[in-house]
Amino acid sequence: MSAVLKPEKIETIYDHGATIEELNQLFYGNPETPEDYLLGLSNDSLLVDIVRLYQLRGQADTANRYASLIKDSSIQAEFATKGCCVAHA
């Protein structure tokens, strides 16, 4: 008998209490539902959106902490050259 594995919880901007106003800014006036939002996004893309959310809130330390979790070296390079202000849609 094999054990049933529970899917890993994916952290998103919705777990960080994003408001409608913040969603409008992040998604340029077209906020998505949490279900639609998850379609086709990588973990790094989800982290980039969390970083952008904390940037909007003026919480640079938290934004930088989440930016450090991004594994894709090309995205990490963008953060290193532009600071914590990368706009990914």
Image: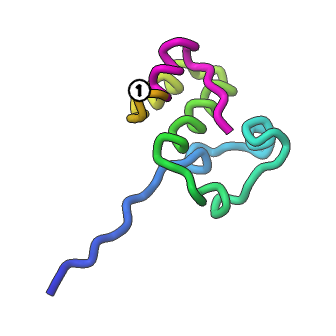
Left or right position of 28 against 8: right
Range drawn in magenta: 75-89
* Residue 47, position as x, y percentages in the image: 51, 39
Left or right position of 43 against 28: left
Q: Is residue 70 above or below residue 31?
A: above
Q: Residue at x 78, y 35 (%)?
A: 25
Left or right position of 41 against 6: right
Left or right position of 17 against 26: left
* Residue where numbered disc 1 is placed: 68
Among the 4 quarters of the image, the one containing residue 72 = top left
Q: How packed is label 1: few (under 14 Cα within 10 Å), some, or many (20 or more)?
A: few
Please check the rendered image and state whether residue 78 is part of the magenta-colored stretch, yes or no. Answer: yes
Residue furthest front in the image? 74
Q: Is residue 2 above or below residue 22?
A: below
* Residue 55, position as x, y percentages in the image: 63, 24
Q: Amino acid at mark 1?
A: Ser
* Residue 50, position as x, y percentages in the image: 57, 37
Please check the rendered image and state whether residue 79 is part of the magenta-colored stretch, yes or no. Answer: yes
Q: Secondary structure at mark 1?
A: loop
Residue sitting nearer the eye, 4 or 70: 70
Among the 4 quarters of the image, the one containing residue 28 = top right
Residue furthest bottom in the image? 1
Q: Residue at x 52, y 12 (%)?
A: 81
Among the 4 quarters of the image, the one containing residue 18 = top right
* Residue 32, position as x, y percentages in the image: 74, 54
